[in-house]
Amino acid sequence: KNQVEQSPQSLIILEGKNCTLQCNYTVSPFSNLRWYKQDTGRGPVSLTIMTFSENTKSNGRYTATLDADTKQSSLHITASQLSDSASYICVVSTRMTTDSWGKLQFGAGTQVVVTP
Amino acid sequence: KAGVTQTPRYLIKTRGQQVTLSCSPISGHRSVSWYQQTPGQGLQFLFEYFSETQRNKGNFPGRFSGRQFSNSRSEMNVSTLELGDSALYLCASSLGGRQTNTEAFFGQGTRLTVV
């Protein structure tokens, strides 16, 4: 079972509207949570990175929230643009311990399509 | 500052052949990770190298191997290619070390097609 679950799998929104993507995780020990945007055929680009103590972080029209108690995160896109059409991937990093280095756990992504 | 460079961008190979992909990280980054991305599976972690040592490995068969050189450049090799190896192979570089909060920067990927 994937330790990082994203929903919805895909969504279609009208240009100018807002949307919210969800990410639930069971990864432990938690270090940080990242949201990436990936355009088709290209490498992912980082949007935000949040540590345990951060509840919200913004990057332009993208706002990510983190509830470390419930192990949930969301990515809110405000006033969507056609260029927002992409896959949005939630990535959770585990904390380094005496037994292992930290590693990244990837969600399957949410495919967002913005239509005119 | 130059980004992460992956070569080649596109590759077509036949079943049974082997292939080597290259990744040059951002200058100063010592960690390089490799990922396989297919439409049905999303991003799957292959392995991570730091200072020429493999320190994390995903669940891939031994046909997939890698290495890192003293200048942090990394190569990934896939032997005895199978049709199912067709995918976008991405590498990501980061500062690495004890800082697990450092950002990972991805290259544009190598699109491998096995026929």
Image (cartoon, rainbow, N blue to C red):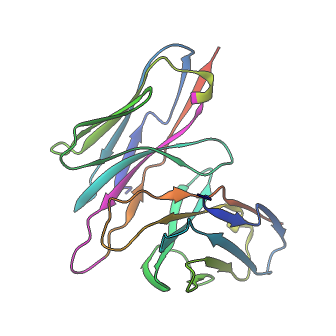
Residue found at x 29% / y 53%: A32
| A11 shown above or below A96 | above
Q: Position of residue A103 (x, y in %)?
A: 37, 67
Q: Position of residue A28 (x, y in %)?
A: 24, 61
Front residue of B15/B48: it is B48
Left or right: A94 in relation to A68: right
Quarter occupied by the N terminus of chain A:
bottom left
Q: Position of residue B21 (x, y in %)?
A: 70, 73
Residue found at x 58% / y 84%: B67
Residue found at x 60% / y 77%: B73
Front residue of A65/A113: it is A65
Left or right: B26 in relation to A2: right
Residue, far left: A69
> Is B16 covered by the magenta stretch?
no
Left or right: B5 in relation to B98: right
Front residue of B41/B95: it is B95
Q: Is residue B84 visible?
A: no
Quarter occupied by the C terminus of chain A:
top right
| B10 shown above or below A44 | below
Q: Quadrant of residue A97?
A: bottom left
Left or right: B50 in relation to A72: right
> Is A97 covered by the magenta stretch?
yes
Q: Position of residue A51 (x, y in %)?
A: 25, 50
Looking at the rendering, the stretch of residues picked out in magenta corresponds to: A84-100
Mark count: 0
Front residue of B74/A29: it is B74
Q: Is residue A12 visible?
A: yes
| B61 shown above or below A87 | below
